[in-house]
Image: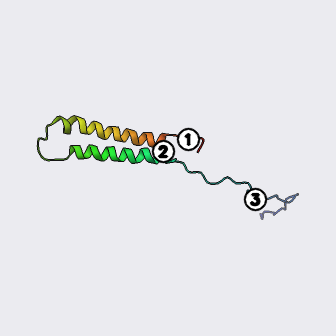
């Protein structure tokens, strides 16, 4: 048996094309200047921690075993703070 093709009773409506917004806001960045400042500070703190860990003499010193890893972790903490910090509302 052949199927019978039927036409719809009313015309099918298609979605209207979206129009361009006329009152668009200027692009705003996710990070503020203070976020980038904190990020640069955190990179410097991490680099300083790795410098404290470097060297070949006295590998069991407190500076290399305790202080330097804490400085590196503090630098990573500052990096997380820089990423999660909300930009100021007045800027």
Q: Nearer the viewer, mark 1 or mark 3?
A: 1
| Label 2: which secondary element | helix
Give the foreground label among 3 and 2: 2
Measure the alpha-carbon separation of dots 2 and 1.
9 Å
Residue under the point 42% across and 46% down: 39
Q: In this view, does 17 lie to the left or right of 55?
A: right
Task: Please state the horizontal and vertical placement of residue 32, each as a whole percent of the image.
Answer: 52, 47
Secondary element at image label 3: loop
Where's residue 42, x and y in %? 37, 44
Tell whether 5 sits left or right of 50: right
3D distance between C-alphas at marks 3 and 2: 37 Å
- Quote the CA–CA distance across marks 1 and 3: 32 Å
The residue that disc 3 covers is 19
Point out the tag, 3 or 2, that comes first from the N-terminus.
3
- At horizontal 78% and vertical 65% (from top left) the residue drawn is 2
User: Residue at 85% of width from left, 59% of height from top?
Assistant: 8
Q: Which of marks 1 and 3 is nearer the N terminus?
A: 3
**Quarter of the image that includes the C terminus:** top right
- Mark 2–mark 1 contact, CB under 8 Å? yes
Q: How crowded is mark 1: few (under 14 residues within 10 Å), some or many (20 or more)?
A: few
Q: What is the secondary structure assignment of the residue under circle 1? A: loop
Quadrant of image for the N terminus: bottom right
Depth order, front residue of 15/39: 39
């Amino acid at each position: 048996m052949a199927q019978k093709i039927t036409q719809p009773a009313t015309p099918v409506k298609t979605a209207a094309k979206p129009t361009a917004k006329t009152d668009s806001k200027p692009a705003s960045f996710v990070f503020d200047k203070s976020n980038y400042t904190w990020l640069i500070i955190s990179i410097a703190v991490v680099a300083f921690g790795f410098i404290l860990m470097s060297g070949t003499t006295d590998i069991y010193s407190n500076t290399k075993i305790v202080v330097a890893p804490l400085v590196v972790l503090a630098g990573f903490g500052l990096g997380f703070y820089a990423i999660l910090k909300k930009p100021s509302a007045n800027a």
